[in-house]
Every structure is written in structure tokens, then in C-alpha cells.
Image (cartoon, grey):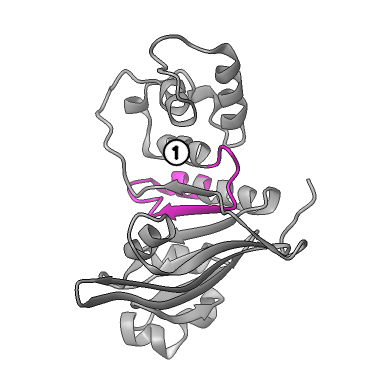
Amino acid sequence: MEKACGLHCTKISNIGVKIGNEEILKNVNIHIHCGELTIIIGRNGAGKSTLLKAILGEIPHTGSITFVDKKDNINKKIKIGYVPQSINIEKHMPTTVYDFFASAITHIPVFLRRDKKIYEEIKEHLKIFGAESLIDKSIGDLSGGELQRVLIAIATKPIPNLLILDEPVSGIDRNGIQDFYNIISKLKSEYDMSIILVSHDLDLAEKYADKVILLDKEVIKEGKPEDVFRSLEFKNRFGELE
């Protein structure tokens, strides 16, 4: 597949959010190019979760989010995939990965019958993430890393323009974290996709991000990880990285 990076851009323009008289976000401007992993960092209360909700259209906001096709120089309606920070799953719940996935992408009550065509379609998509063997496994029996693979698979069917990941590796062991970032690398290199990831883990941000956004109600600093982490703006909020 020919890499299309550089031809598309998700533009987050002048996003502002107020709750009562309190300004939670003001004039947030971010350009996210395809083939890039943009990691958003900031202290608690900096507005990271609020920004994600605004992008997803879950809360009222000013400003706009557009997907620009630079090749044709037109704006298109953006397709967004989203993986939340956590979902409530009871241990050993009987719902299988197939049931869970099928209910997310179809309007057919999956408990009525198993659709062979949809089953094969889901299995083929799970294969992208090395998760096809999980299709008949109960959701409640998945490890943290396995569940993350399934959630990303669901979020990327159909392939979105923008993938949003909220603290995606919390509760995942070191091997699972490496597997996760291998998947992200594959999505960056093989699919026409912008990726936003919110993280509290500064070490992972420094290691894996193409671009880091330091948020404190507005964009305080952005750029390559080494530039952001060495900046006075970063040191004023987090101190020196070890």
C-alpha cells in the first residue's frame, strides 16, 4: 500500500469550552497529519479529557474540527475512531469477542444468530492486529493487552481519518505496551490515519510520539518530543525529566 502521508490533515481550530463562567479550554489549535502519532500531555485539570469530548462532539464547544484532503483541497466529513480509557467488563462474562464486535458494527441482535459473513469479516479485520485467535474468546477472560487489541480493531472498522486513544496502556504490562505501540506504528505506516493519544506517561510520550502537545487549557508548547520536554513551558509544569 502506498503511503499517503502528507496529503491529509485533521485541523482542530479555535476550540473553546466553557462550563458556567469557567473557561476549560481556549483557542486550541492543532494540526494532525496522517502517519503521525500526536501525544497530548498535561497536568490533571489541563483539559485533556475535555478536548477529547469536544472533538468527539460530546460537549458544546466553539471552533471546528475538519478533515482536509490537501490533494483535492476540500474539506470532508471526518470519520473518527475512539478507544476509551476504560470499559466496564465483568470477569468471565460470557459475551465473546465476536458478539461484542458484531454488536458494535451491525444493528442485528447478535444473540439471535451468528452471521457467517460478518464472522469472517471480523476475523479478517482482527488479523491486522494479531488478534484473530481471540474471536471466540469471552471478553471477560481477555488480558489487558488482548482487550486493547480488540478495542482498537473495533475503533478502526471502518478505517477512520482520526483515531483517538485515551490513556490506552494503563493497566497493561511491559510486553503489552510494546505490542500496542507496534500496532500504532503499523497503523501509521500502512493506513491513511491521524492518531491522537492522551497520556500521563511522559517516558512513553518521549519514546513513541512524533509530535507532543503540552496542554494547559490552551496549547502551551508543541513540537518534537525532545523540544517540548526541554522547553521552559514543560519545566514550569513538570520540572526536569530524569
Viewer-side residue, 124 vs 78: 78
Q: Is residue 121 left or right of residue 228?
A: right
Q: Which residues are magenta?
A: 156-179
Residue tagged 1: 151
Q: Is residue 27 above or below residue 76?
A: below
Q: Is residue 210 left or right of residue 15?
A: right
Rendered-image quadrant of the N terminus: top right
Q: Is residue 74 left or right of residue 198?
A: right
Q: Position of residue 105 (x, y in %)?
A: 49, 30
Q: Is residue 138 visible?
A: yes
Q: Is residue 179 above or below residue 110?
A: below
Viewer-side residue, 57 vs 174: 57
Q: Is residue 3 above or below residue 23?
A: above
Q: How packed is label 1: few (under 14 Cα within 10 Å), some, or many (20 or more)?
A: many
Q: Position of residue 70 (x, y in %)?
A: 73, 65
Q: Position of residue 136 (x, y in %)?
A: 46, 18
Q: Position of residue 11 (x, y in %)?
A: 56, 68
Q: Residue furthest top?
A: 113
Q: Residue at x 55, y 18 (%)?
A: 119
Q: Residue at x 49, y 67 (%)?
A: 64
Q: Is residue 150 left or right of residue 6?
A: left
Q: Residue furthest right?
A: 2
Q: Amino acid at mark 1?
A: Leu
Report which quarter residue 140 is drawn in.
top left
Q: Is residue 242 visible?
A: no
SS category of the residue bearing label 1 = helix
Figure label count:
1
Rendered-image quadrant of the C terminus: bottom left
